[in-house]
Amino acid sequence: MPDTPEPHPGETDEARVGRHRLGPHVVGQRVVVRHLLPDGRANDVLGTCTSWGADSLTIDRDGHGPVVVALADIVTGKPVPPRASVRSRVSPREAEGHGLGLWPDMERVDLGAWVLRARPAAGGDRPRKRANSALAMGDAGIPLSHATNEVRRFYADRGQAAMVQVELRSSYARWFTSLGWQPVPGGDAHFQVASVSRALRAAGRGLDDARITETGSSCLVEVGGDTVVARGEAHLDGDWVGLHTLEVDPARRREGLGTAVVADLLDWAASLGTTTAWLHVEVDNTAGLATYDRLGFVTHHTNRYLAAP
């Protein structure tokens, strides 16, 4: 059933006054309301209904102040979806940009908005896809075929296989796939975001015996004595904090250690004024996705890594 009756052909706004399905049930919801002005013109108001009285309702216009509308003047009205948060409205390129400082020793070459990255594994570390791939989001500033050749040349000069990080189902993903680039096994990962304050409330307290090491804009949390059983790192970029390298000893999983590490990292970040937390989680990591969902994380976009043929 529609929210507002369909108008009859030629029917004026004045004739439709009062024919709507709004009511006290919309308090707390975001609504759009058309109402008559004193001069007979109609005006639309969009915002959150904060009160419904006997003769009027009040709408908070998304931070632009309240408006009181007489019920007798309402022409049409209906609930609308909640406004997307600021963190959800940034582009994938802008969101991914908050992670470019994770590894200070990473070699970086900018190609327009694209970023060519190289950080070969050292010691017992495993090479990280994100640090050894070209972030192919935004405008490269040159024709796409030329940008692709620059990516190939960059990694060939360093003796590495060429790889790109693209947004899943984007035009760039289709372009590289058309050239024969193949998905890297296990490479698809969600970029998830959450409100720091909400995630911290959901995570609860950290562990009293956790070791917290701060280094500039980064923080390391470790749990355990001589043998570390859980760890995680965080990196600040503006008012965003990225959580990464979250690991729990397989023998100690399901004890809440991972959530406790996240709580300590978020507490550290919140003390420095951050408002948005983000992380990468592989799409097949069902346990991790369940944990992050409980903490309030939602998927902003999904990444795919493609390797040159």
Image (cartoon, rainbow, N blue to C red):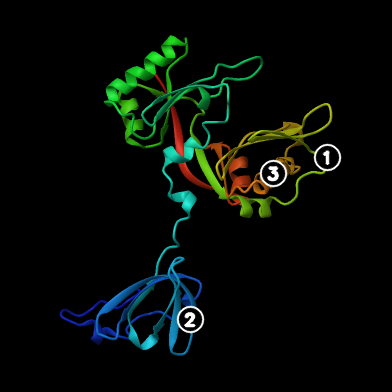
- The amino acid on which the numbered mark 2 sits, given as a three-letter code, is Pro
At 29% across and 78% down in the image, what residue appears? 5
Seen from the viewer's position, the closer of residues 182 and 167 is 167
Q: Is the residue 7 above or below the residue 206 in the image?
A: below
**Residue position marked by numbered label 3 in the rendering:** 268
At 43% across and 40% down in the image, what residue appears? 92
- The amino acid on which the numbered mark 3 sits, given as a three-letter code, is Trp
Q: Secondary structure at mark 1?
A: loop
Q: Is the residue 61 above or below the residue 83 in the image?
A: below
Whether residue 1 appears in this view of the structure is no
At 43% across and 46% down in the image, what residue appears? 90
**Residue position marked by numbered label 2 in the rendering:** 24
Q: Secondary structure at mark 2?
A: helix
Seen from the viewer's position, the closer of residues 215 and 20 is 215
Q: Quadrant of the N terminus?
A: bottom left
Q: Quadrant of residue 123?
A: top right
Q: Position of residue 168 (x, y in %)?
A: 40, 36
Q: Position of residue 188 (x, y in %)?
A: 48, 33
- The amino acid on which the numbered mark 1 sits, given as a three-letter code, is Asp
Q: Position of residue 162 (x, y in %)?
A: 42, 18
How far apart, in angstroms, are the residues tagged by discs 3 and 1?
15 Å
Mark in the foreground, 2 or 3: 3
Crowding at label 2, few (<14), some or many (≥20) Cα neighbours within 10 Å? Answer: few
